[in-house]
Amino acid sequence: MSAILDANGKPFKIDKQIMSDDIARAYTTGVRNPRPASVASTLTPQRLASVLRSVIDGNDPEAYMTLAEEIEERDLHYSAQLRTRKLAVAAIAPTVEAASDEPADVEMAERVRDIMNDDQIPELFFDLLDGLGKGLAVVQILWDTKTTPWKPQDYKWVDPRYLRQDQDTLDQILLISEEAPTGEVLEPYKFILHTPRSKSGSVWRNGLARLVAVMYMLKSFTIRDWWAFAEVFGIPVRIGKYGANASEDDISTLINAIGRIASDAGAVIPESMKIELVETAKGNGGNTLFENMARWCDEQVSKAVLGQTMTADNGSSQSQATVHNEVRIDIAKWDARQLESSINEYLIKPYIILNWGVQVRYPKVRIKVPEPEDLKMLVDSLKPMIESGMKVSAQEVREKFGLREPKADEDILQPAAQLLMQSPPLTDTAMNRHTPSVAINRVMNTAEKEIDILTNQAMNEWEQVADEFMNPIIELANNVDNYDDFIAALPALQEQLGADEFIAQMAQYMFQLRGLGDTQDG
């Protein structure tokens, strides 16, 4: 294969063996040792400062990467919060956008969709998001070079403990090996590099592990002291009493018995001796002190990882949890955009260049974080607007709820009152033929509630239909001097009053109530 340009614009020769092999594998006898010495077990303020400083000075960052891994293993709270943030993006199915509507660009997008539908993609996203904790993540592409076009047959996570900074700028990322113990440049088109940014500056100082390292150390001290406190104040004091004539053997027997009570909850002693169990004080609130300190450390970790504490620590209400749903939406979108950039730069472009050469434009992988939406609030808001005459697209509402357009021959759900008004009277032939086209909702109101609804509806429309006969009566009452004259003038007024609209409405309500009664009575 002819030489092509790498990411830095320099030509290089493609080696099919290197592109398909696992060139970052670790060996217990090599410089990439998969069994590092523990850092968290010997962590002190001085040791932590030295570990964090070693990354800044460009020294060996292996201790820091080991600590970042161990914090994720040992602190359950940090592990859960970090995993939540990773899965908020890694669990999203990616989409592919063509560079344009031209046939060549559309065809290229289809080729990219082919590799983005592989089963390894979710694990690839998860491994790349490991950079959230450590500041950077590198994944090796194992290309299948036996067939064309070349496709990734697998992805291998590279342990960040094998990565180093170049000594000139402390910016370039190198991979150590037996041939280059201090590190060598990553092979072009062989590795996917993801450096998520939580702040501006060096990638080596961007990891969440750097933010939570102090909280982890303080919490570990607190938990250790808490258990020591529980051993002292949670177990009753055992007091052994012996007489003045007790021998050395008797005293030794009593001491052994006290020890057995502590471990076996039982012991045998001479009848002349006594053992008393004295309850200790509760420690004057010491248990609450340690718990509050540990909880405070967890809250700071939640702020660093998720950007909030409501869903993680505070036991908030459902409404609060809906607003602050797990990871803050702006943080999730930022993680997704950065991951998109890494995938497009280090996977999509190499895949196209290695197979079809350099292009003017490339397809784009998109990871779209869904916006949380309160559908109940949407329904409650739309109902009065629709009743007021506002036109709303039924298709748009169906898409919100994930509902499809009903087919012509399917039963559909409608309000019971609307169904009764729309259904024509059944003839004898129709009663013997079962052709249902509309299904009444399974959840129906009681007869009393339906009557209340119709009553409220009639009362709300009273003034609209009553003007026809109420206004003349009110005018008559205003023009007479006494009640007797008002009663005497009513018969003549009655012949002039019109109530056609009112009578029609009352007839409609009577028809609805009759139909409701027939339905409820079966």
Image (spheres, rainbow, N blue to C red):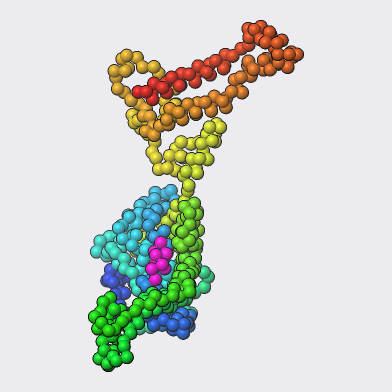
Q: What type of secondary structure mainly makes up the magenta span?
A: helix
Examine the structure image and report whether residue 77 is included in the region drawn in magenta: yes
Q: Quadrant of the N terminus?
A: bottom left
Image mark count:
0
Q: Nearer the viewer, residue 408 or 323?
A: 323
* Residue 257 as seen in the image, left or right of residue 349: left
Residue 214 appearing in the image: yes
**Picture quadrant where residue 446 is located:** top left
Q: Nearer the viewer, residue 71 or 510?
A: 510
Name which residue lies at 61% across and 23% down: 463
Percent x, y of residue 448: 45, 28
Indicate whether 22 appears above or below 508: below
**Magenta segment:** 75-84
Percent x, y of residue 434: 30, 22
Name which residue lies at 25% across and 79% down: 267
Name which residue lies at 39% across and 78% down: 232
Q: Nearer the viewer, residue 74 or 59?
A: 74
Examine the structure image and report whether residue 116 is included in the region drawn in magenta: no
Q: Nearer the viewer, residue 231 or 392?
A: 231
Q: Quadrant of the C terminus?
A: top left
**Picture quadrant where residue 128 is located:** bottom left
Percent x, y of residue 10: 42, 72
| Furthest residue toward bottom | 248
Percent x, y of residue 187: 36, 73
Residue 54 appearing in the image: no
Name which residue lies at 44% across and 37% down: 395
* Residue 337 as seen in the image, left or right of residue 176: right
